[in-house]
Image (cartoon, rainbow, N blue to C red):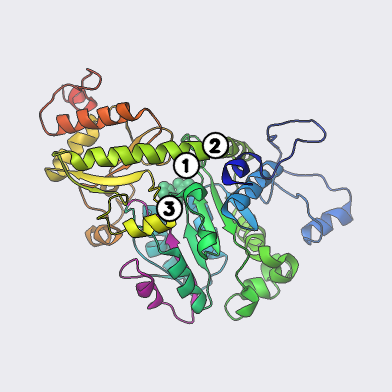
Amino acid sequence: MRRETIAIHAGYVTDPTTKAVAVPIYQTAAYAFDSADHGAALFDLTVPGNIYCRLSNPTNDVLEQRLAALEGGVAALTTGSGMAAIQYAIQNLTEVGTNIVTYPQLYGATYTLFAHVFHRQGVEVRLAREDSPAAVAALIDANTRAVYCESVGNPAGNISDIAALAEVAHRHGVPLIVDNTVATPMLLRPIEHGADVVVHSMTKFIGGHGTTMGGAIIDAGRFDWSAHPEKFAMLTSPETAYHDVVFTEQFGAAAFVAHCRSVCLRNGGATLAPLSAFLLLQGLETLPLRIERHVSNARRVAAFLREDPRVAWVNYAGFPDNPYHALGLRYLDGNFCSLMTFGVKGGFDVGRRFFDALMLFKRLVNLGDAKSLATHPASTTHRQLNAAELARTGVSPEMIRLSIGIEHIDDIIADLDQALEVAAGVATVSRATGAVPPARASAA
Ligand code: PLP
């Protein structure tokens, strides 16, 4: 099946008992055992089935199968948020004294987790000088357990050379973990380019309507953990955190996700609620259509901003002179994502006036909603970072990040136009709607 069909059908056939066509919401905390032996066999992982909703749920299971099929993996695990997925994917492979290697152009909370939280727990996160495979390779040593990147970085818009990073990681006997939130499997499937594990914030495009938190981990099922038992003993030797199960023996290609579920999720507890899984399944069904509109609207907005004399710069990989253009042609097939950053002429203060004058765009910290969204990273998502860290992560003080929604393109551009006019001091009243922009209303 093609991705458009997988997004609607994978993982579910009409329920044989109830004939329900939509995926039912299994709103239960626990599941009954047939007998003591049945319960024991479930706990031993020797028979498949549900034990307790923190570990698994039939609604979540449909979403997990659908995500695995969409990304081209063998198994998936859903979590209560994208950050939980990232945390568990790394916790699954690391212990005190080990490290992972990545680069700093990452989503703000991921950067903070990596740079300021993990090291307190004895796991070092090495940040490469720049987002090149060579800079990453230079930091890998015998204690490295994974290479990590975002396929399309938020908010810097950097596009990772996934195949080259996978080659570097594999040459050193470690897997590549890719956060594919911004691109989504509709635009890019990292596993096809060599990634071993894919993580998602489903809160964004997959849900697509700004209603539901969720995360996911997808296992490509290709990495040979048994070839490196000295590094991945948690998967290849008896796991004391789960009564000595050897995950590579019991689960074969799906060992990574099975261990993540049985150890990280079971003991960490950031489970996706079944109702959330249902809402995210609704989102997935229209993801292919929405992405088409997100991408075409973004192309028009980028062109509008670039031509506008009130705009100082626009960072959008769709421009041929953008440093990531060639990687975008290769990995996104020219369908550059709907996230972009830009700066207005006049710097921080004019930028803030622009931000406050937006009327259709929502001012918030989120992306991937059907609605058009605007964020000022330096004062919000990246606020915890000092000036040097902001520069390293690619966030300038005046930078505004836009997530272009699926409204009519003329209305999106009209809002940007009137906000630019207000910011430049030309208009005091919104040209788009005739209303007084919020900043001026509150000033009055
Ligand atoms: N990864 C990326 C690229 C993100 O943009 C975000 C959130 O913005 C996350 C992960 C974290 O996801 P969540 O907010 O669902 O925890």
Q: Amino acid at mark 2?
A: Gly
Q: Residue at x 71, y 41 (%)?
A: 12
Q: Is residue 279 above or below residue 224?
A: above
Between marks 1 and 3 in the image, the one whose residue lies nearer the viewer: 3
Q: Amino acid at mark 1?
A: Phe
Question: Mark on residue 332?
Answer: 3
Mark 1 or mark 3, which has the lower sequence index? 1
- The residue segment tinted magenta is 127-155
Mark 2 or mark 3, which has the lower sequence index? 2
Mark 2 or mark 1, which has the lower sequence index? 1
Mark 2 and mark 1 residues within 8 Å of each other at the beta carbon: yes
Between marks 2 and 3 in the image, the one whose residue lies nearer the viewer: 3
Assign a secondary structure to mark 3. loop
Are there few (<14), some (14-19), or many (20+) residues within 10 Å of tag 3? many
- Magenta span includes 358: no
- Magenta span includes 154: yes
- Across and down, in percent, residue 217 comes to 57, 55
In this rendering, does residue 56 appear at all?
Answer: yes
Left or right: where 197 falls relative to 238:
left
Q: Residue at x 68, y 32 (%)?
A: 22
Report which residue position mark 1 lands on. 205
Report which residue position mark 2 lands on. 283
Mark 2 and mark 3 residues within 8 Å of each other at the beta carbon: no
